[in-house]
Image (tube, rainbow, N blue to C red):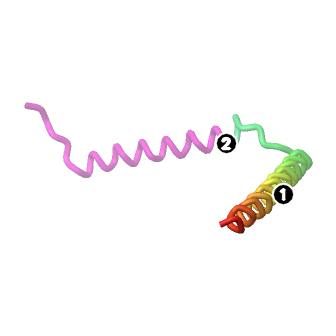
């Protein structure tokens, strides 16, 4: 059959794996990820803001046009 490890031994192995995972994540965030500069971040935020406004305006126009079409449609009946 085989030797079965007691729960404390299994918990220690699990904790070692969790600690190794956290260390690997930290190492990757510090040494491998290229973070944007403050200026790049501001430019990206402006692009997202303007795109959101444009999309919201388009949806607003679609809503108004469908609303007026449906009002005309229901006036017929």
Mark 1 lies on residue: 57
Query: Percent position (x, y) of residue 49?
Result: 84, 55
Task: Report the residue at 61% width, 44% height from top.
Answer: 26
The one nearer the camera, 70 or 3, is 70
Looking at the image, is 67 positioned above or below residue 31?
below
Give the residue number, with chain letter if any, for mark 2.
29
Foreground disc of the pair 1, 2:
1
- Mark 1 falls on what kind of element? helix
In the image, 13 versus 36, the foreground residue is 36
- Quadrant in which the C terminus appears: bottom right
Q: Is residue 3 above or below residue 43?
A: above
Query: In this rendering, would 32 be left or right of 44?
Result: left
Locate residue 3 relative to residue 57 in the image: left or right: left
Most foreground residue, 9 or 31: 31
Looking at the picture, how far across and down is residue 45, in whole percent? 84, 52
Neighbour class for label 1 at 10 Å: few (<14), some, many (≥20)? Answer: few
Which residue is drawn at the image coordinates 67% and 42% (left, top)?
A: 29
Picture quadrant of residue 23: top right
What stretch of residues is rendered in magenta? 1-29
Residue 71, percent across and down?
Answer: 73, 66
Q: Which mark is residue 21?
A: none
Q: Name the residue at 28% across, 46% down.
A: 10
Judge whether 9 appears above or below 31 on screen.
below
The alpha-carbon separation of the residues under discs 1 and 2 comes to: 38 Å
38 in the magenta segment = no
Q: Is residue 15 magenta?
A: yes
Give coordinates of residue 40: x percent, y percent: 88, 45
């Amino acid at each position: 059959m085989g030797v079965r490890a007691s729960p404390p031994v299994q918990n220690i192995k699990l904790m070692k794996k969790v600690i190794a995972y956290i260390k690997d994540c930290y190492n990757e965030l510090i040494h491998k990820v290229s973070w944007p500069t403050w200026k790049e971040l501001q430019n990206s935020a402006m692009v997202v803001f303007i795109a959101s406004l444009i999309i919201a305006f388009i949806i607003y126009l679609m809503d108004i046009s469908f609303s007026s079409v449906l009002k005309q449609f229901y006036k017929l009946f």
